[in-house]
Image (cartoon, grey):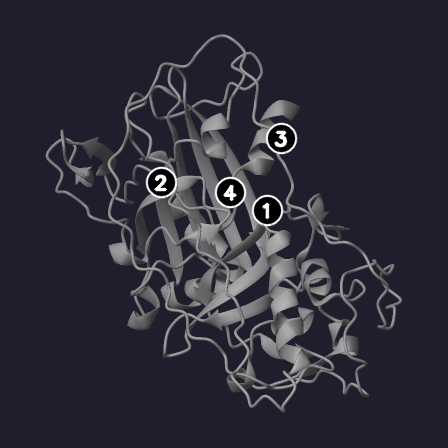
């Protein structure tokens, strides 16, 4: 596979971008197809072959409620999700709003297969295959296929991109399972992938809706004689810094806003401290209870609690439902830093930057309601002439100022924005 293709793939949504036209099942022969009727919304249906009965989902799977598809995020996903299948529907409250696929959702669903189509103006449309270099055989007539397999946060993810040979149509099919379940489920997943059918001259999806606006932390109204709590100002600065680094590509071990960071570097920079890891972040933070979370706090998964032993950390912004099972977060996760709603994961330890008070309340900001099903748009034939590819413009980085926090032995300190209150003696992070 050529370097140009890998560069394009690196920009395409990875774990949370879900995607396009639909999957066939395990038994003989039901396949999925995508159909658009004139002046109607997109219809996705399963068609029987050779007299076989229609199969609404792969064997052992159920269809996920449509209102759970296509979660909004900043930056938006490059594909319009059309359907999800999963092994089970456990906690019904998790599927009342659009929600991305994370390890917490997979623990409830068992395993997930999803299908989608490229959105106009998204990076997926730019995914190209040089037929002189990339000649992957495809069981789907009219398409090249590209497979990508990876593990992250205890998940095993297999993604197949379908690139139309003669048009700009792009489809994506993705299976997500717990890493320990992959060996048992892999044969079924691959059979389902191989039974996919789609029209290479079919339409793409319209452009993504605008991303959700960032939250503004409003200080509580107080008597004129009482000075405002400095922690509320610092918390707003934390959210502002996190928003300024959205779209930064995920790079394990990276520490450069706008160029490449991992999850702990992202939270460290948002907090305005030197670069820490999920293991050393306890040097500048204290553990708190779930009920104590406030905007700008974090949720930390240490390596000992991550099945893959890598760890992960997210920045808390607000609750997304009254049950506190959905949460707004800023996080650096493959392929890039995003702002979105995820399922609350109780494996993560809530932590707070040392020196911040418990002032204020955790905001309740309901998750976005499902968007109306968009109509697909006609395609244009692929041009044989070379066209310039869009350039990536990173978001503005912070103006560095010295910090007053200890420097970990595992990583070099990074200048960051805004000094923080001098922390008191910080207890160790326990679980």
Residue, x 45% and y 62% (percent of image)?
A: 341
Q: Residue furthest top?
A: 385
Identify the secondary structure beneath mark 4. loop
Contact (Cβ within 8 Å) of mark 2 with mark 4: no
Classify 10 Å Cα crowding around label 3: few (below 14), some (14-19), many (20 and above).
few
Residue that carries the numbered disc 4 in the rendered image = 13
Mark sitting earlier along the chain (2/1):
2
- Looking at the image, residue 145 lies above or below residue 228: above
Residue, x 52% and y 74% (percent of image)?
A: 218
Quarter of the figure that contains the C terminus: bottom right
> Mark 1 or mark 3, which is nearer to you?
1
Residue that carries the numbered disc 1 in the rendered image = 247
Identify the secondary structure beneath mark 2. strand
Residue that carries the numbered disc 3 in the rendered image = 7
Residue, x 61% and y 74% (percent of image)?
A: 297
Mark sitting earlier along the chain (2/4):
4
Q: x%, y% of residue 246?
A: 59, 51
Q: In terms of depth relative to the viewer, which is nearer, 238 or 249?
A: 238
Classify 10 Å Cα crowding around label 4: few (below 14), some (14-19), many (20 and above).
many
Q: x%, y% of residue 169?
A: 37, 25
Q: x%, y% of residue 278?
A: 71, 68
Q: Residue furthest left?
A: 51
Residue, x 38% and y 37% (percent of image)?
A: 207
Residue that carries the numbered disc 2 in the rendered image = 116
């Amino acid at each position: 596979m050529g370097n140009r293709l890998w560069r394009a793939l690196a920009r395409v949504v990875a774990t949370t971008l879900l995607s396009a036209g639909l999957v066939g099942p395990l038994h003989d022969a039901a396949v999925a197809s995508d159909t658009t009727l004139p002046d109607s919304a997109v219809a996705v249906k399963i068609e029987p072959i050779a007299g076989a009965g229609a199969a609404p989902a792969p064997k052992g799977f159920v269809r996920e409620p449509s209102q759970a598809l296509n979660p909004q995020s900043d930056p938006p996903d490059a594909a319009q999700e059309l359907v999800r299948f999963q092994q089970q529907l456990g906690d019904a409250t998790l599927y009342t709003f659009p929600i991305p696929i994370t390890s917490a959702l997979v623990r409830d669903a068992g395993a997930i297969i999803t299908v989608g189509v490229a959105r106009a103006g998204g990076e997926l449309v730019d995914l190209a295959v040089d037929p002189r270099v990339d000649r992957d055989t495809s069981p789907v007539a009219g398409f090249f296929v590209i497979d990508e397999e990876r593990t992250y946060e205890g998940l095993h993810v297999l993604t197949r991109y379908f690139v139309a040979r003669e048009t700009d149509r792009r489809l994506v099919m993705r299976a997500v399972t717990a890493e320990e379940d992959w060996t048992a489920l892999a044969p079924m997943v691959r059979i389902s992938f191989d039974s996919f059918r789609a029209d290479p001259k079919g339409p793409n999806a319209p452009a993504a809706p605008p991303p959700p606006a960032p939250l503004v932390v409003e200080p509580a109204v107080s008597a004129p004689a009482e000075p405002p709590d400095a922690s509320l100002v610092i918390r707003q600065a934390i959210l502002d810094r996190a928003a300024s680094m959205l779209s930064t590509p995920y790079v394990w071990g990276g520490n450069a806003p706008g160029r490449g960071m991992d999850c702990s570097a992202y939270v460290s920079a948002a907090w305005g401290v030197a670069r820490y890891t999920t293991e050393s972040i306890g040097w500048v933070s204290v553990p708190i209870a779930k009920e104590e979370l406030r905007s700008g706090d974090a949720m930390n998964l240490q390596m000992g609690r991550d099945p893959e032993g890598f760890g992960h950390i997210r920045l808390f912004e607000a609750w997304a439902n009254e049950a506190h099972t959905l949460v707004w977060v800023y996080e650096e996760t493959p392929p890039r830093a995003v702002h979105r709603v995820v399922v609350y994961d109780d494996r993560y330890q809530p932590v707070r930057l040392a020196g911040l008070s418990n002032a204020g309340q955790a905001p309740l900001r309901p998750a976005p309601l499902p968007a109306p099903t968009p109509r697909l748009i006609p395609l244009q034939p692929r041009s044989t002439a070379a066209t310039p590819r869009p350039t990536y413009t990173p978001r503005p980085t912070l103006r560095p100022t010295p910090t007053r926090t200890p420097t970990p032995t595992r990583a070099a300190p990074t200048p960051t924005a805004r000094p923080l209150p001098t922390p008191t003696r910080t207890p160790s992070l326990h679980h």
